[in-house]
Image (cartoon, grey):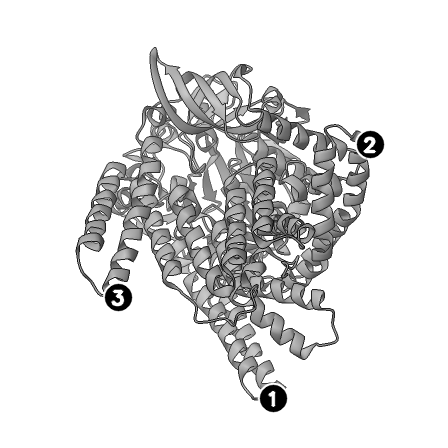
Amino acid sequence: MPTWPSGSVSEAGARQLDGRSPTRLDLRLALVSIAAWIGTQLGLLCGARWPVATVWLGGTLSVLLSAGLLFTRLDHARRFILTCLLAVGIGGCSAALRLLPLVSGPLAALAADGAAISAQVELTGDPVRKVAKVVGDRRGPELVEATANITAFTARGKRWALRVPVLLRGDSQLIAYGPGTRLSVEGVLRPPGYRIGVAAIVSLRTAPNMLGRAPPVWSATTDMRHRLVADCAGLSPDVRGLLPGLAVGDTSGAPTQLLADMKVTGLTHLVAVSGTNTALILAALLALTARLRRSTRVVVALIGLAGFVVLVRPQPSVSRAAVMGLVAVSALVLGGRRSALPALGGAVLFLVVVDPWLAISYGFALSVCATAGLVLLAPHLGDALRSRLPRLPALLVDAVGVSLAAQIATIPLIVALAGYVSPTSLPANLLAAPAVGPATVFGVLAALAGQGFPGLAQVFVHLAAVPTWWIARVAHWFAGISTLGMPKGLGGGLLALFGLGLVVVLVRSRIRHKALLVAGLACLVLLSRCGASAGPADWPPSGWIFVACDVGQGDALVLRDGPESAIVVDTGPDPRAVDGCLSRLRVTSISLLMLTHFHADHVAGLSGVLHRRAIAAVVVSPYPDPPPEQAAAQAELRGRGLTARELATGDRIKTGTWELTVLWPPGPSTSDASLARAGGPNDEALVVSAAMVGTPLRILLGADIGPGPQARIEAAPGIAYSVVKVPHHGSTYQAAGFARWAGAPLAVVSVGAGNPYGHPVATTLARYRAAGAAVLRTDESGDVAVLLIAGRLGYRLSR
């Protein structure tokens, strides 16, 4: 009786479980699922602006195409094309229907005004502990977040009954409740900002009151999770933070540096409750039932999978992993690789229609690519490796084949989105792989035993601690090895795909000259390094004074302050991107680091700025919001021995080349503080006028402020600005006269290509062009450099 290997859940779907030879793959359902995926993305993009129109158009298209398929006699090709178009319509309609109550309902309108609310909610996820607020040396109350569905609420004297998702933010009292618990809460509504899939954020003002307990199954598993975290308290920081992540997906206690190192080395999937975790549970269950009938094994696998999902919570990543697990189960039932690919297509089709947010999820795309690679490539790689390395153990060969297949399938997507390939990912995963199974299985057993057998739970915790320590060590060891940089975007993805094709051709050919393979790979590396420079050969341009770095959807701005020194304003979302930009500019020291506010797209790249550079001073906004990101940034600064100084309206800083004047925000204790707080972290951001000493040049750095602060700044006496950094990535939240008031001949928009927010909007760009500005965008032009040569202003683009 065949059994599943323990390497991967999807590998099982790729095996010939019934001994039959593989036949031609059936790609029809896979292509239909891709069509639905594209339709869902279009629905989210259009539905955010025209939700009703998108629902109407998608629904009408779906009805017409369905009628055409049912009542029209067509050949197979035309029927297939109509089916794909129908999938596009269904995906778009589903996405718009999910968006409609979020963007056009009463809750969204009230959140935009910061209204107070009294509501009844039902938690849909576990409350997550965030790091505590840190203000100077004082430690404030802990922040806890939880997803929930509002069922009814009262605001401004009116009551509504509806069911929409929101995000709750409160203190440690919220942590006691688990999924399914019904609560009565009071708080203040805020717009969701970058939070996707919720109508608003509810900041709780008082402790929640419980209206109804969670169902027994949720209560029991909540206790298991809490007990596991408590049982790990006596372990080292890396182990006690990582073990709950491996077992139940709880990474709230994991050190920031460990998570960063795992991301660099391609090990993040181990703590994301991905297909690997699901594979281990399914493989263990199927190994225990190896002597039973196939139908019995499938039933056991499905029951075990359902129990595991309840334990780790059916969040999007978990649901994704579970459905991908069903792909393998269906392959076991139907048999062979031929059935696994249609099963994968059906899983993708089901997921993007039921949960449209997955269509724009980086993790979902990686999961699908990895699963497809395992279905299509793992069997061939395993056979090829076994034929060439017959003396190696079969288990080791299978592990190498599975890991290599997943890496190969995801390389083009990683390059397109991140701009690098980690050569350490494969060896890191291979070294970590033997430890993942024991750590996960013993961790789950510790969670189960913690309810009634605390002594046994401690035994399992310590058994899991050793392999968990090994995984952390592997992440730290390989994180120090540099990655292979490549150009981001479609060009980089195609370059990576070309390189993989070259390797396949050379490997499959009969040519035995190793020099040809080496030469081909050397050409690929040379092309990738040239592309990774992200700039011309003579970059940085002579006479540069200001650069907006291309760091994706975020801000990282550089003011030249000496031959190899600069002022850096914000760090962007990606440490590698901002580090690369500063390296290209040959910046080795930072005379002033300014963090305008603490949203991740402005501070998450902090470690990249700090990498091998001396920092003279750090200044920040006086408002510590959002608290998790603020505390993480402050902790990273303290780890480097740096203390941040808070600035407010009217403060001035002078360096060798620049004089900076803070235009916004007012201090927290002033009468205008409520205007800053009303718009959340964006309106609490530092806005600075940078004057170049000895010249009339002025640069306005607008951070992410909205219409209210912009209007207040406009009320001040006008200054002849030379350059303006357009606020909030060119979003629609702009004061009507701000562009004309700034009056700058150059307007720079720091924005990420293909971002899900639709930034920058056409109306904002039109306002700056109408005001006489040349609009430069980092998503289109790469790094944007402003030049001052012989007193004349100019610019240069890196691409």
State which tag comes first along the sequence, 2 or 3: 3
Asked if the residue at tag 3 contacts the one at tag 2, i.e. Cβ–Cβ closer than 8 Å, the answer is no
Residue type, mark 1 in image: Arg
**The residue positioned farthest toward the top in the image shown:** 157
Rendered position, 553 above or below 369: above
Is residue 570 something that shows in the picture?
no
Give the spatial CA distance, label 2 vs label 3.
64 Å
- The crowding category of the residue bearing disc 3, from other C-alpha atoms within 10 Å (few below 14, some 14 to 19, many at least 20), is few
Indicate the position of residue 739 as horizontal and vertical percent values.
Answer: 31, 40
**Mark 3 = which residue?**
77
Give the spatial CA distance, label 2 vs label 1.
60 Å
Badge 1 element: loop
Residue type, mark 2 in image: Gly
**Who is closer to the viewer here, 18 or 583?**
18
Asked if the residue at tag 1 contacts the one at tag 3, i.e. Cβ–Cβ closer than 8 Å, the answer is no
Q: In the image, 632: left or right of 489?
A: right
- The crowding category of the residue bearing disc 2, from other C-alpha atoms within 10 Å (few below 14, some 14 to 19, many at least 20), is few
- Image quadrant where one finds the C terminus: bottom left
Rendered position, 364 above or below 148: below
Residue 455: image tag: 2
Residue type, mark 3 in image: Ala
Residue at 52% x, 64% y: name it.
336
State which mark lies toward you, 3 or 1.
3
Residue at 36% x, 43% y: name it.
730
Asked if the residue at tag 1 contacts the one at tag 2, i.e. Cβ–Cβ closer than 8 Å, the answer is no
Indicate the position of residue 127 as horizontal and vertical percent values.
Answer: 57, 28
**Mark 1 = which residue?**
512
**Who is closer to the viewer here, 438 or 476?**
438
State which tag comes first along the sequence, 2 or 1: 2
Give the spatial CA distance, label 3 vs label 1.
43 Å
